[in-house]
């Protein structure tokens, strides 16, 4: 059975920090592959700050295709699920679609203090498992729920908000984004007038 780590997010845009975490977990973690799971527009966030789903999905594909030697893939499953989209629904749906795979959720340590607020969080950690990577300013506190495993991935302090703001002010984001993603953003004018 192949173990797939699912790294969910809005990826607005996907940046090298996301790629480093995925690369680390795919190569040094307890999974065979990492799939980026694009989250749909969040009704609690300002839609003016979020690139269209199709653009964010294309940026994910461009980033993953920039290094085909890594076991990384892109999933748009959450775009087809009922809203709001919950992690447990994503895990159940993918498990039904791909019974030959075992799925585990990947998340940052910044989510652990709020894990108890996730829908069916005990099923997520108990039946599927969770891989947690460190985030600056969010140390992991023991004891951890059963099924939660910490990986010692490098901490990269890059945020999509920083990148969007830098692009809007005309800054060069080489080294923060893969070249293909940067080219796509510039060609389409994404984030140009966003704050």
Image: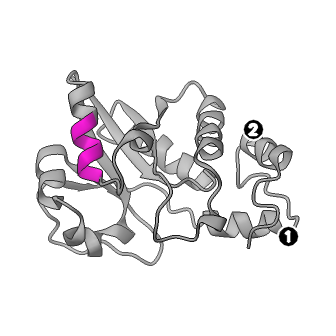
**Residue at horizontal 23 percent and vertical 71 percent from the top:** 117
**Mark number displayed over residue 169:** 1
Q: Give the residues drawn in magenta, as a range.
A: 87-93
Q: Residues within 10 Å of mark 2 (few under 14, many from 20)?
A: some
Residue 11 screen position, x and y as percent: 56, 53
Sequence-first tag of 2 and 1:
1
How many labels sit on residues? 2
Q: Residues within 10 Å of mark 1 (few under 14, many from 20)?
A: some
**Mark number displayed over residue 180:** 2
Specify whether residue 160 is painted magenta: no
Given the current orientation, which residue lies at the most extreme right position? Answer: 170
Residue 106 screen position, x and y as percent: 35, 51
**Mark number displayed over residue 131:** none
Q: CA distance from mark 2 to mark 1?
A: 20 Å
Residue 190 screen position, x and y as percent: 76, 54
Question: Is 72 left or right of 161, judged from the image as shown?
Answer: left
Specify whether residue 90 is painted magenta: yes
Mark 1 residue element: loop
Residue 41, relative to residue 6: is it above or below? below
């Amino acid at each position: 059975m192949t173990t797939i780590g699912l790294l969910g997010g809005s990826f607005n845009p996907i940046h090298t920090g996301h790629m480093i975490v995925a690369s680390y977990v795919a190569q040094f973690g307890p999974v065979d592959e990492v799939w980026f799971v694009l989250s749909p527009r969040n009704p609690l966030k300002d839609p003016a700050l979020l690139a269209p789903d199709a653009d964010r999905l294309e940026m994910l594909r461009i980033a993953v295709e920039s290094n085909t030697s890594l076991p990384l893939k892109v999933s748009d499953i959450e775009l087809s699920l009922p809203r709001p989209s919950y992690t447990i629904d994503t895990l159940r749906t993918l498990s039904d679609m791909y019974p030959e795979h075992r799925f585990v959720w990947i998340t940052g340590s910044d989510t652990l203090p709020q894990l108890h607020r996730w829908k069916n969080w005990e099923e997520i950690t108990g039946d599927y498992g969770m891989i947690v990577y460190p985030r600056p300013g969010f140390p992991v506190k023991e004891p951890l729920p059963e099924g939660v495993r910490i990986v010692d991935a490098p901490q990269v302090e890059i945020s999509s908000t920083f990148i969007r703001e830098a692009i809007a002010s005309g800054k060069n984001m080489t080294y923060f984004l893969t070249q293909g993603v940067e080219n796509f953003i510039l060609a389409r004018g994404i984030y140009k007038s966003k704050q």
